[in-house]
Image: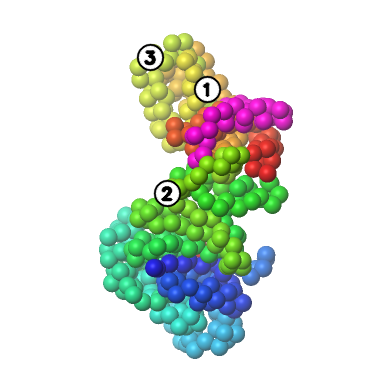
Amino acid sequence: MLKVLKFGGSSMADATQFAKVKSIVESDESRRVVVVSAAGKRFKDDHKLTDLLYLCHAHLKYGVSCDSVYQMIVDRYTAIRDELHLNVDLESEFAALRRKMDKGISQDELVSRGEYFAAKLMAAYLGFAFLDSELWLKFKLDGSVDQEATYEALRHAAEGRKVVIPGFYGTMPDGSIKTFSRGGSDITGALAAAALDADVYENWTDVSGFLMADPKIVPDPEPIERITYSELRELSYIGAQVLHEGTIFPVREKNIPLNIRNTNQPDHPGTMIRESFEEVEMPGDRFITGIAGKKDFSVITVTKNGMSSELGVLRQMLEVLEKYQVNVEYLPSGIDSVSLVVASDKAQPCLYQMMGDLQKAVKPDSIHVTDNMAIVAAVGRKMAFKPGISGKIFATLGENGINIRMITQGPEELNIIVGVDNKDFASAIRVLYNSFVK
Ligand code: ASP
C-alpha cells in the first residue's frame, strides 16, 4: 500500500504546522511519498513565500533593491529550522542563491525556491530523503509535461523509498527550471501518485474537503463526502474553487482515488473523489452533490423562422464567435432560435462587430442580447436516476420569487443549469441549498 501526500502552503506555514504534518505522516506506514508547497500564510495578512519570491524577482528586474523582501524569505525558513532544531545548512544555500540572483536568475527558478527550501526542511524533519523535482519532472518544449519520461524517472528515483519532493516545478529539455502556473504543487502530487501507482493521493489543505456551496453565499455549508471526477469537473468549470485544473487528469487516468483532507483536523475524512461509487440508494437521499455558479454572462439570441431545418446555420454562428475568440459556454436552442451564452467580459469588446457578422452570415429575423445573466448549476450523479428532479428545482426557485431566464441540462444528466438575473444569483444558490441539501 502506498499513499502519496501533498501538503499545501498553510500546512507548511510554520513550525507548528510542520509538527502536524509529521504526526499525520507518521501515523500511517503507507504514507511514504510527501510533496510540499512553499510556506503559506500563518495569519490573514501574512505573506505567502511564493508571493515574496515573485516580488523579489520584480525588484531585480527593475533594478530596485530586494534586500528587505529577501530577508523576509530567509527569516521565515530559518525560523522554522531553528524552532524544529533541524540540521540544515540554509546559510550557504541562501548565500549561493543570492549570488545567482545578482548574476541574473529566471523568474521560474527564483520562485521555485519556495518549494525547494520547504522540502529540504520537511525532509530533514521527517527523516525522509529529499528528492529534487529537477531530477524527474520533465517538461517538453511546448511547456506540457513529458509524462512518459517523468513517470519513468520518478519510478527510478523513488520506488521503495521514503521521500519528500518539492511541488510546483520541473525542468525543460535544456535543464532550466520551469514552474507550473500558480497552485501547481497539486499537479506535482498527482504526477507522483500516478507515476508510482499509489493507492490513494491525499491532498492535505486547510479545509475539510470541498464544500457543497460557496461559504461566502451559504453560511456554513456542509462538506462533500464523496464526489466523482465528472461531478468535480462540472463544479469547478462553473466556478467552484477547488484544485488546480491540471490535477485531475494524471490520477483519473490511473483510477487513483483523490482524498482532500484537513491538516488542522486530521480525523475528518474529508472529500473522497473517485471515478464512480458503488452506492445503495436510500430513500430520501440527497440528489445534489454540490451547487456552484458564476455571474456576468451575456446571452445572444438569434431567431429565424425555419432555422432548425436549415443546414449549416449553427456552424455559421459558431464560426463568427470563433473568429472573435469568444467561447460559447452553453447553447440552449428552440425550433426557430438559438441562444449563445458567453462570458460578458469576453464578448463586450467585440459585441457590435460580432452581431454585424452574425447578421451577414445567418440573415436572421432578429438578434437580441441579454446582459447581466448568472448561471447556477446543481450538480449530482444521482439526478440521472430520479424522475421529476428538474421540475422540483424549477418549482422551488419559482416559489421563492426567482425568475428563471434559461434552462439547460448536460446530456449525461449530471447537472441542471439555470440562468437567472445577476441580482438573483446568491438567492438562487441559497434557495437550492436550503431546499435540497439542508
Ligand atoms: N507555491 C506555489 C503557489 O503559491 C505553488 C503551490 O503552492 O501550489 O502558487
Q: Is residue 76 left or right of 153 when viewed as pictured?
A: right
Vertical comparison of 221 with 150: above or below: above
Q: Nearer the viewer, mark 1 or mark 2?
A: 2
Image quadrant assignment for residue 437? top right
Vertical comparison of 93 with 182: above or below: below
Instruction: Let me know if residue 146 appears in the view.
Output: yes
Determine which residue is flagged by label 1. Answer: 301
Answer yes or no: do the residues labelled 3 and 2 have beta carbons within 8 Å? Answer: no
Nearest the eye: 199 or 229: 199
Most common SS among magenta residues: helix
> Which amino acid type is shown beneath numbered disc 3?
Glu
Report whether the residue tagged 3 is closer than 8 Å to ligand 1: no
Q: Earlier in the sequence, mark 1 or mark 2?
A: 2
> Which amino acid type is shown beneath numbered disc 1?
Thr
Determine which residue is flagged by label 2. Answer: 275
Q: Which residues are magenta?
A: 381-406
**How far apart are labels 3 and 2 at the CA level?**
40 Å
Q: Earlier in the sequence, mark 1 or mark 3?
A: 1
- What colouring method underlies this structural image? rainbow
> Which amino acid type is shown beneath numbered disc 2?
Glu
Determine which residue is flagged by label 3. Answer: 310
Residue 272 x, y percent position in the rendering: 50, 55
Nearest the eye: 311 or 275: 275
Q: Is residue 138 left or right of 20 when viewed as pictured?
A: left
Residue 40, magenta (yes or no): no
Report whether the residue tagged 1 is closer than 8 Å to ligand 1: no
Residue 80 x, y percent position in the rendering: 57, 81
Nearest the eye: 109 or 154: 154
Residue 335 x, y percent position in the rendering: 47, 15
Nearest the eye: 285 or 352: 285
Residue 390, magenta (yes or no): yes
**Where does the C terminus fall, quadrant-wise?**
top right
